Image (cartoon, rainbow, N blue to C red):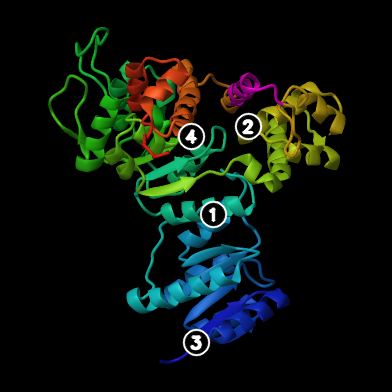
Amino acid sequence: MSISTILVADDDGAIRTVLNQALGRAGYDVRTTSNAATLWKWVSEGEGNLVITDVVMPDENGLDLLPRIKKIRPELEVIVMSAQNTLMTAVNATQRGAFEYLPKPFDLTELLHVVERALQSAQSSGGTRNRDGDADGDEQLPLIGRSSAMQEVYRSLARLMGTDLTVLITGDSGTGKELAARALHDYGNRKNFPFVAINMAAIPRELIESELFGHEKGSFTGATARSTGRFQQAEGGTLFLDEIGDMPAEAQTRLLRVLQEGEYTTVGGRTPIRTNVRIVAATHRDLTQLIRQGLFREDLYYRLNVVPIRMPPLRERREDIPELVKHFLAQSAEEGLPWKIVDGQALERLQTYHWPGNVRELENVVRRLAALYSQETIGIDVIEAELADAAPPINEERPSNGISEAVEGHIRDYFAAHQGELPPPGLYDRILKEVERPLIALTLGATRGNQLKAADLLGLNRNTLRKKIRELNIPVTRTPK
C-alpha cells in the first residue's frame, strides 16, 4: 500500500512542527509550507493526497483558495483549520467544499481521525462534494461565541446547511435555539423561501392544529372563513416548531403523518395537501421523560430527532460572556442608546453569575446597562446592583431552610428561565408532578416496593397511590428484606 502524502499550509511554525511530527508518526508523508502560493503550486502540479490548510495566511486566505483547489482537483479533500472560531468560518469552509472544519486549538487525536476519514472519502467517492452559494462575511453573526461548546454547534450547523434533514434542537430557555434554526435556514438550500416559526407553548392547545394546518370555513365555532396554516405559509422553506414538547396529542398524530407521508389535511378538510417544507423542532424539555409519562409520541420523537443539536447553557460557555456583552452593547448603540464599556472587573463578575435565563437574560441585563446608567464605563458596583436580587453566583453556597426553600428556589429559577415571557399554561400541575414523583419513588424505595406500606406512610389511599404511580410512570420493584 502506497503512503499518502499530506500537504500542510500554516504560517505558524509551531503548528507546522506539531502536525509534521504527529502525521509522520502516524505513517504519512508530510510536506509543510507557510504560504498559500506554495500550497497552490503543489496542488496544481498534482502532488498530495490530502490538504490541511489554515484560513489566514500572509499571501492569501485559505478559504479563497478552496474553490480553486476543488475546481482542478475535485477528488482532493481539504481540511480547514482556523483560530477565527465563528459560525461563519465553519459555514464558509463547508460551503466552499471543505471536508471538515477544525477550530484552533485542535485535538491531535481528533485531527488524526478526520485525516483518516478524509483519505477514505477521497478513495471511495472521489471527493466530489458540491456546495451551492457562499455565506456572507462575519458582519452579522447569527450566533456569538468562540468556546469549545459553541464550536460543536457551529460544526453541526455547517454540515446540515446543505441538507433537508429534520433537526431537533434542545437546550434550556434563552440559549438561542431559534437563532440556530434561522442559521440553518438563512445559509441553507431553502434561504430564498419563507422561514415560519410557531411556538407551541404560546398558542391555546385547542387552536394548534388549525394554526399548523389551516381550517375550512365552518369547521369549528368561530371559523367564519377558510384560513391557511403555517405549513402552507412555509411552503418551500423551513417550519420551526418551537417548544415541540408542549404539542397536544392530536396535533402530534397529524404532524407524524406529515413527516411520514409528506401531506396533511386542513381542519375540517378531506383533500390531502402535499407539502415541501423542512422541519426544525426545538424544546427545553426532556422529550424522553415526556414519552415515559405518555405525553409525547415515541414514533414522532424518532421522526424529529433525525439530527440532534444541543445548545449549551451560558454557564457552560462563560468564556463567551465578554464577547456577548460587547455584541449586545454594540446592538444597543445601533438602536440609539448611549455607547457603554464594561470594565474588566465587572466582566469577571458577570462570568461568575450562573445565568438561569442564559443568553436572553444576559442580553436584558446589558440593555439595562445601556439604557439606565449615565456613566460611559460600567464598573463592578453597577453590576453588583443589577445582580443584587438574583440567585448567588457559582461556588457560593446559601443556607437551606428545608424543602420549602428548595422548592421556592426551583420555582424562582423556573420563572427566571422564561424571562421576558410567562411559562406555558399548566404550571401548577407540572411543578406538583416534579415534587410528587421523587416523593413517591423514594417512599416506595424505602418500603422495598410494598405499595400498602408506602400508601400508609404517605397518608394516601392505596388506589390513589396506584393511580399516581401509573400517571407518573414510576417503576415499582418488590425486593426482599
Q: Amino acid at mark 4?
A: His
> For the residue carrying disc 1, how many other residues have a C-alpha within 10 Å: few (<14), some (14-19), or many (20+)?
some
| Residue identified by numbered label 1 | 152
Do the numbered discs 2 and 3 sit on residues whose CB atoms are within 8 Å? no
Relative height, residue 125 to residue 414 (above, below): below
| Quarter residue 359 falls in | top right
Q: Which residue is mark 3?
A: 47
* Residue 294 x %, y %: 32, 30
Tell which circle, 3 or 4, labels the residue nearer the N-terminal end: 3
Return the mark for residue 284. 4
Q: Looking at this rendering, what residue extends furthest in the left direction?
A: 270
| Residue 481 as seen in the image, left or right of residue 176 | left
Crowding around mark 4 (Cα neighbors within 10 Å: few <14, some 14 to 19, many 20+) is some
Depth check, mark 1 against mark 2: the one in front is 2
Indicate the secondary structure of the residue bearing disc 1. Answer: helix
Q: CA distance from mark 3 to mark 4?
A: 50 Å
Percent x, y of residue 358: 62, 35
